[in-house]
Image (cartoon, rainbow, N blue to C red):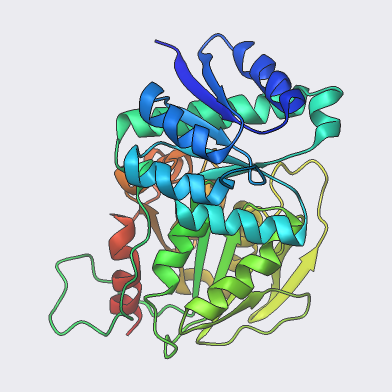
């Protein structure tokens, strides 16, 4: 049965082009269109599409308001179209907070010209989001609830115990990552004894705004990484979008453009792999929700150095591609639901 899609945009040109891209895929079918947020809510409730593509700027009701109302009335995976600007980054992060599961850049040049790359990205995301939602109906639609800062546990854990100390924690993620990172980092205290590196697949114009948002929400000090930064306990650094982030010494960060042949900027594999030389078995790495398999080879290097790798449990992922790739390669020491990751980090490191 084809995956059904509702397109929401006030531009008839954009709706026509997106409809053509989606309907050209044999497994996808556009079942309706809406020109404003109010119509989007009504048609989502009535048509019950598998996925909604959503614009932000529309008459009567904007995209973020529409996302909130859809999630309240007819929870549905929503893919936002976003401009690659600082303002667009903030709007997109608001939409993800409201319940959207992922986003794509909105470029009239890509849509109007040779849209092969856009078609591939759009169809892949729709298929992945809908597939995950069908396998785990609650996973792609769950939102991070506010949670208190985690305190060290009063009783012994029934989980695995580790003999080594951990001098570095790394979190690698893609689709669904902004919400997952928010859920984890809001629950980690400022006294956390190790530095944290975050690798999130995200455009360069987005990571600065995302780091600022996390810093406002979290007890930890959080910022976008810069070349030459020094790692400190109680601080979390986010790899800049469009760049690669490596360690070029124990506790020292190198940010650079990297090889054009690498699919992901930043790449989880690149950061994970570079840390092994300096931290060896004192690494604890966590692979979170995301499409693809970035992080699997980096996790393999960490395991070869006797470090520890955790994977997010599949049913709690927006997309389980990245964690599942690590689990299938037998590289995961633990498979942990998203709601337990922060507690386990605090438990193991304190």
| Closer to us: 248 or 186 | 186
Say which quarter of the image contains residue 115: top right
Q: Say whether residue 200 is left or right of residue 329.
A: right
| Closer to us: 210 or 249 | 210
**What percent of the width, then of the height, locates residue 315?**
30, 43
Q: Residue furthest bottom?
A: 191
| Closer to us: 340 or 42 | 42
At a point 42% along the width and 91% down the height, the residue shown is 191
**22 vs 105: above or below:** above
* Circle count: 0
**What percent of the width, then of the height, locates residue 45?**
37, 30
**What percent of the width, then of the height, locates residue 31?**
50, 16
Q: Residue furthest front?
A: 60
Q: Say whether residue 134 is left or right of residue 85.
A: left
At a point 77% along the width and 80% down the height, the residue shown is 228
**97 vs 234: above or below:** above
At a point 77% along the width and 68% down the height, the residue shown is 255
**What percent of the width, then of the height, locates residue 295?**
54, 50
Image quarter (top left, top right, bottom left or bottom right) of the N terminus:
top left
Q: Say whether residue 33 is left or right of residue 284.
A: right
- Whether residue 296 is visible to the viewer of this picture, yes or no, is yes
Say which quarter of the image contains residue 344: bottom left
At a point 76% along the width and 71% down the height, the residue shown is 254
Q: Say whether residue 330 is left or right of residue 300.
A: left
Say which quarter of the image contains residue 221: bottom right
| Closer to us: 196 or 185 | 185
């Amino acid at each position: 049965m084809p995956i059904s899609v509702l397109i929401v945009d006030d531009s008839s040109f954009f709706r026509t082009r997106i409809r053509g891209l989606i309907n050209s895929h044999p497994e996808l079918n556009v079942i309706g269109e809406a020109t404003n947020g109010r119509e989007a809510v009504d048609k989502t409730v009535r048509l019950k599409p598998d996925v909604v593509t959503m614009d932000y700027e529309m008459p009567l009701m904007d995209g973020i308001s529409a996302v909130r109302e859809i999630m309240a009335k007819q929870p549905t995976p929503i893919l936002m179209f976003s401009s690659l600007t600082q303002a667009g980054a903030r709007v997109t992060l608001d939409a993800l907070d409201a319940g959207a599961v992922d986003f794509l850049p909105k470029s009239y040049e890509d849509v109007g010209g040779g849209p092969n790359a856009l078609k591939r990205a759009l169809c892949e995301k729709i298929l992945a989001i809908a597939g995950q939602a069908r396998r785990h109906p609650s996973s792609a639609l769950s939102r991070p609830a506010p949670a208190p800062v985690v305190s060290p546990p009063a009783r012994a854990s029934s989980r695995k115990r580790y003999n080594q100390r951990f001098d570095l924690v790394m979190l690698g993620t893609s689709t669904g990552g902004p919400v997952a990172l928010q859920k984890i980092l809001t629950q980690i205290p400022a006294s956390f004894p190790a530095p944290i590196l975050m690798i999130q697949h995200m455009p360069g114009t987005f990571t600065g705004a995302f780091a600022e948002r996390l810093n406002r929400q979290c007890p930890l000090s959080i910022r976008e990484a810069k070349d030459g930064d020094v790692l400190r306990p109680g601080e979390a650094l986010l790899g800049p979008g469009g760049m690669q982030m490596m360690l070029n010494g124990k506790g020292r960060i190198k940010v650079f453009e990297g090889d054009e042949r690498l699919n992901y900027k930043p790449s989880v594999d690149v950061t994970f792999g570079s840390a092994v030389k300096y931290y060896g078995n004192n690494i604890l790495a966590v692979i979170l929700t995301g499409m693809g398999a970035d992080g699997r080879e980096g996790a393999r290097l960490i395991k070869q150095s006797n470090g520890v790798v955790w994977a997010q449990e599949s049913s709690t992922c927006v997309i389980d591609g990245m964690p599942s790739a690590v689990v299938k390669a037998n590289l995961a020491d633990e498979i942990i639901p998203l709601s337990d990751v922060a507690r386990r980090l605090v438990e193991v490191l304190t």
